[in-house]
Image (cartoon, helix red, strand yellow):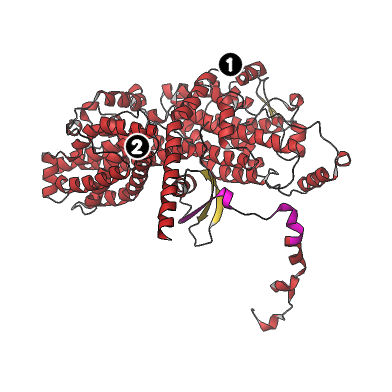
Amino acid sequence: MSKEWPLWEVFIRGQHGLAHRHVGSLHAPDAEMAVHHARDVYTRRNEGVSIWVVQAKDITASAPGDKGPLFEPSNSKVYRHPTFYDIPEDVGHM
Amino acid sequence: MYAQLVKTDGHGVKSLDEMDPQERAFQERIDDNQKIEPKDWMPEGYRKTLIRQISQHAHSEIVGQLPEGNWITRAPTLERKAILLAKVQDEAGHGLYLYCAAETLGVSRDELLAQLHAGKAKYSSIFNYPTLTWADIGAIGWLVDGAAIMNQVPLQRCSFGPYSRAMIRICKEESFHQRQGYDIMMKLSAGTEAQKAMAQDALNRWWWPSLMMFGPSDADSVHSAQSMAWKIKQNTNDELRQKFVDQTVPQAEFIGLTVPDPDLMWNEEKGGHDFGEIDWAEFYEVLKGNGPCNAERMAARVKAWEDGAWVRDGLNAYAEKAAARKTVTQTAAE
Amino acid sequence: MTGALFEYALRMGDSCLILGHRVSEWCGHAPAIEEDIALANTALDLIGQTQMWLGLAGEIEGKGRTADNLAYLRDARDFRNLLLVERPNVDFAHTIVREVLFDLWHFHTLGALQASADARVAAIAEKALKEVSYHLQRSADLTIRLGDGTDESHSRMRAALDALWPYAGEMFLEDDIDVALAETGVGPALGTVKPLWEADMRRMLDQATLSWPKSSHVQKGGKTGVHTEALGYVLADMQFLQRAYPGATW
């Protein structure tokens, strides 16, 4: 079997000016072709205005085992959320 | 279904008490409807079963391009041609999404394709039937895609994140597929006598193979229980088949076509249709490779792959040269 | 003038139709899934452009013929597409070389047609040009990559280029219809398209490490309906249902 085209992760900015969002993956021999393929595969229904591709092997991910130490500490910081504060209704919108 | 006879790894469904702590934590997450992601710990059986199920599903999409692709060049109007091409192209896209989902489990797309080409992987029995007339294109959209959607909608809630996300995208895109098929059938049924006959003939030939798509009766299916416990299967084969029959029968009546089953009858008590016995001998023969088109379908896939080898290699070679040239230029600039 | 524009719309529409048909034959058979999807996108664009051009032809003719009537109920002698686009797919190299030879001509032609004195023509050109710019980007990119890829990909591209080159010349053969349209500002002067095509083609072939083909022979006939044997089979396939069930609607 000859060498497989590497795997790329595809991120697309939708019509409404939001951030690029991961939409899926594909195979391509290099970055330029990955962009072409992404256009053909992931924007067939007018989904995007901008494409990012990154080779899957270049992504560094957090370890699933670290989920506790990484994310649970923020659970207790309730004061970061606006609903933590009781502001009298008379004050108006804040 | 598209993955209609997936062998499940595992030795019967264990109770939580019988599991070791890791497996128990895993099962509890599933029971709590949490998604399992690729890097999470998972039982080897879960991983293997998923690879099998997702790849069967993916193979079915790309083999499924062939019977319909057969009529792209013969579609009767420019609009029908565009619609059919767009639909078959979607199937290629769905195959692509699904292979990518399988790849997150540590197997490469080329390996999965090699299994398909070697005849070691299954795909849905339905695609081994021939498309003989234009009405078959209508029947496939209406019945085959209708049956597929019935299975795929619950799979959006599958416990494995990448599979679930692929199914969400696929279901969104497929929403026009069944409609375009029914639209063809409506047009034919309202057409000339020859067109009506063509539509009825297609329904006659595709009805039973469509019912077979849901797989053997659960009473005979040894793999369902574990897959359901793992939430990589949400409904039993019989439940989905019943739902499909109940949904489809009135649609056939609406356009004046007759479902080819003398035993078909509304059963007030169960609130659904009773229907005749499926010819399971035929089903197993088709799965074994003895369907009308197994050999052609496989030959077409293998030919596409082998004929395309020089293209994939050529593009790889260019990418390597271009990368090397870039490195040289950068080094020279430093 | 009206007669000339009718002929011209047929030429554009038929070339899109037949090329779209050829490209659509790849669906399910391409070298990789990504390519399968990309080829289908090109074919879909071309079918859409066919509907616009043949729709315009029917409108100009004024006899009530629709784009479908024109596509499905004319025989080969009445087709006005370039011979190039009816040549069979053969392999991926032939498909891409046929595509790039045509795309580059199509791109410059539509560029000129955007300024057409006929507003309907200009509108079609404007819409089609965006699609064709992408077709060209893709086919030129693939030509360069496969030309400068492996020995095998290079020799296959070489063979395809040599086989199809004689069919490229027809794109620049001017006849009375081209002249009449150029004089009224409706169509482009082919003399202006050719140097643009040649300059771009030379650059691209250089990058692809493919030399300029030696043959200067031109195969012609498409614009007057004298085709290669291949077209009859394309039409037999494409028109089968409309011919077998006359008068039926689908």
Tell me if I can see residue C68 in this picture. no
Q: Relative to B41, is B131 above or below? A: above
Residue neighbourhood size for the residue with mark 1, other residues' Cα within 10 Å, grouped as few (<14), some (14–19), many (≥20):
some
Secondary structure beneath disc 2? Answer: helix
Tell me the quarter of the picture where residue A83 sits: bottom right
Residue located at (13% from left, 48% from top): C182
Magenta-tinted stretch: A50-69
Question: Quick check: can you spot residue B11?
Answer: yes
Q: Amino acid at mark 1?
A: Asn
Residue A55 forms part of the magenta stretch = yes
- In which quadrant will I find the C terminus of chain C? top left
Query: Which percent across, then down, holds residue A77?
Result: 75, 70
Q: State the mark number for residue C96.
A: 2
CB-based contact (under 8 Å), mark 1 and mark 2? no
Chain of the residue under the numbered disc 2 shown in the image: C
Residue B268 on the magenta span:
no
Q: Residue at x 29, y 52 (%)?
A: C126
Q: Which residue is mark 1?
A: B290
